[in-house]
Image (cartoon, rainbow, N blue to C red):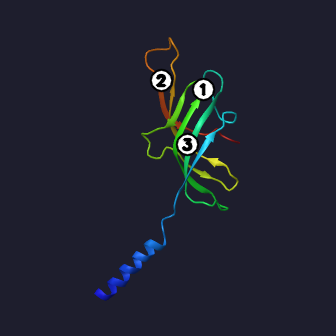
């Protein structure tokens, strides 16, 4: 039994060294204020600027969907609100990059903190929750 164990151990070590785990690729994307906006329930749309950071499952992209995680978000609305990932959610944004180049994030859990204007009250407002993309027909 002992002579068989040594080759198995050596083979498993060589396989572990020869086949590294698929390396994820980290990508940071800038939000274009002319293409990104946030529309509050009251008031007009506000442009967004900042960055969103993704961890892509595999590169190069093939002819199939590629999974990704949103691992960073730092955005500011033109009205002063800041938007970050919700630290209380383990996976705040899981999504798919399609072969056509579309980023699909079904739900993104974020914290939205808005600046308080004079006379609005004693506490700044902070909201947490999931953002879902608009329904398409």
Dividing the picture into quarters, in which one does residue 6 lie? bottom left
**In the image, farthest residue toward the top:** 119
Which image quarter is the C terminus in?
A: top right
Dividing the picture into quarters, in which one does residue 89 lie? top left
> Do labels 1 and 2 touch, CB within 8 Å?
no
Q: Is residue 132 left or right of residue 17?
A: right
Secondary structure beneath dot 2 equals: strand
Q: Is residue 76 left or right of residue 136?
A: left
Q: How many residues crowd around disc 2 within 10 Å: few (fewer than 14), some, or many (20 or more)?
A: few
Q: How many residues crowd around disc 1 within 10 Å: few (fewer than 14), some, or many (20 or more)?
A: few
Q: Is residue 101 above or below residue 17?
A: above
Residue bearing the label numbered 3: 107
Which image quarter is the N terminus in?
A: bottom left
Horizontal and vertical percent position of residue 90: 44, 46
Q: Residue at x 48, y 65 (%)?
A: 21
Q: How many residues crowd around disc 3 within 10 Å: few (fewer than 14), some, or many (20 or more)?
A: some
Residue bearing the label numbered 2: 125
Residue bearing the label numbered 1: 40
């Amino acid at each position: 039994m002992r002579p068989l164990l040594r080759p198995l151990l050596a083979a498993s070590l060589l396989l572990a060294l020869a086949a590294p785990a698929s390396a994820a690729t980290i990508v940071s994307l800038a939000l274009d204020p002319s293409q990104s906006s946030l529309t509050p329930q009251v008031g007009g749309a506000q442009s967004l600027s900042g960055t969103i950071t993704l961890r892509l499952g595999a590169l190069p992209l093939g002819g199939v969907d590629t999974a990704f995680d949103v691992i960073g978000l730092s955005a500011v609305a033109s009205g002063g609100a800041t938007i970050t990932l919700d630290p209380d959610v383990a996976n705040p944004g899981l999504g798919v990059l399609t072969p056509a180049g579309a980023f699909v994030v079904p739900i993104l859990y974020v914290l939205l903190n808005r600046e308080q204007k004079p006379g609005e009250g004693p506490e700044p407002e902070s909201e947490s929750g999931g953002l879902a993309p608009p329904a398409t027909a």
